[in-house]
Image (cartoon, rainbow, N blue to C red):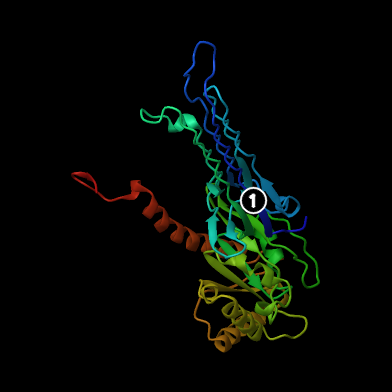
Amino acid sequence: MRFVDEATIDVVAGDGGNGCMSFRREKFIPFGGPNGGDGGRGGSVWAVADRNLNTLIDFRYARRHEARHGENGRGSDQYGAAADDIVMRMPVGTIISDAETGEVVAELLEPDEKVLIAKGGDGGFGNLHFKSSTNRAPRQKTPGWPGEHRKLKLELRVLADVGLLGMPNAGKSTLIAAISNARPKIADYPFTTLHPNLGVVRVAPEQSFVVADIPGLIEGAAEGAGLGHQFLRHLQRTRLLLHLVDFAPFDDADPVEQVRAIVAELEKYDPELAAKPRWIVLNKLDMVPADERAERLKSFTRRLRWKGPIFSISALTREGCEGLVRAVYDHVAAQVRPAAEERDPRFDPVDADGPR
């Protein structure tokens, strides 16, 4: 399936129904008075976050979503019926913005979150609405209000705790397949990954985190070179970046220069993304002779002047993967807990007089 993470759609809310001007006319009732009802409300357009969706493919082929108009008011005190609303289901993580101004309308960050994106017009008033003690035969009525018409841009950013980045063929897909339930395509040529892959990593029955694998980056990605630049936005919501480095490249490329090239692209694309916590993961350890590993690691760390966490693994043989997964989970859990304490009143301090 082709990964579709952007779409442009038109949403049109329904117009409100017109009010009615009518008078009661029955035999032997010469002054029946006004009985024109109000118009019905036009249908609105809502967006709902659906945890079972993971692409915007449906909106690629259905670009116009139009709600029905409200019914007009009628005589005999009959009000027009309101039109049904339209509910559009979108993946969790979708950003809805105005295509013309770029203003963000809403972000669907929680499952079943519901937001109004186009409001239906209110119904017009019938002359029954204007009846008073001093105006017993009103001839006023108002038309229904028009519904909102908006051109919206939908952008999906995957919600993952950990993001994998690195050069093509660094072993990102192999790693996500080794530690999670994801089964991406794996081959021995660059740019095998064409769209982001999500996987859930189980550390224990009730301990897990979500990892995202994006297409490989190359130098010039921030300007549009390669494939990874199209999906760098998916790393902006992650809590931790794992920078995979090919520790035994076939083309004699310098791993240190590859790391510096990727960091430079991140800084060009988004300085905030480059400032996220990032760990170095040296992959393909099985391709390096055992007696050379310590010296290569020492040389790599010294030349890169790296002071952060660094792991040596083999995604193919899963050597070192268990320690990496445990360290990642501890880091993610440490960040999630303070956020939960801020939201959940159960974590509020308690004294003798009760919760503060």
Q: Is residue 301 above or below residue 275?
A: below
Give 204 or 149, whichever is nearer the viewer: 149
Q: Amino acid at mark 1?
A: Val
Residue reaching furthest left?
352
Is 90 positioned to the left or the right of 354 in the image? right
Q: Is residue 112 above or below residue 175?
A: above
Residue drawn at point x = 55 percent, y = 37 percent: 41
Q: Which residue is mark 1?
A: 11
Is 344 positioned to the left or the right of 309 in the image? left
Q: Is residue 218 above or below residue 338?
A: below
Q: Is residue 63 visible to the viewer in this orientation of the structure?
A: yes
Residue drawn at point x = 68 percent, y = 81 percent: 220
Q: Position of residue 185 (x, y in %)?
A: 77, 61
Q: Position of residue 299 (x, y in %)?
A: 60, 87
Q: Position of residue 38 (x, y in %)?
A: 52, 32
Give 101 or 261, whichever is nearer the viewer: 101
Q: Position of residue 316 (x, y in %)?
A: 72, 66
Find numbered disc 1 in the image and state the secondary structure of the residue it sits on: strand
Query: How would you rate the neighbour count of disc 1 (Cα within 10 Å): few for under 14, some for 14-19, many for 20 or more?
Result: many
Q: Quadrant of residue 143?
A: top right
Q: Quadrant of residue 214?
A: bottom right
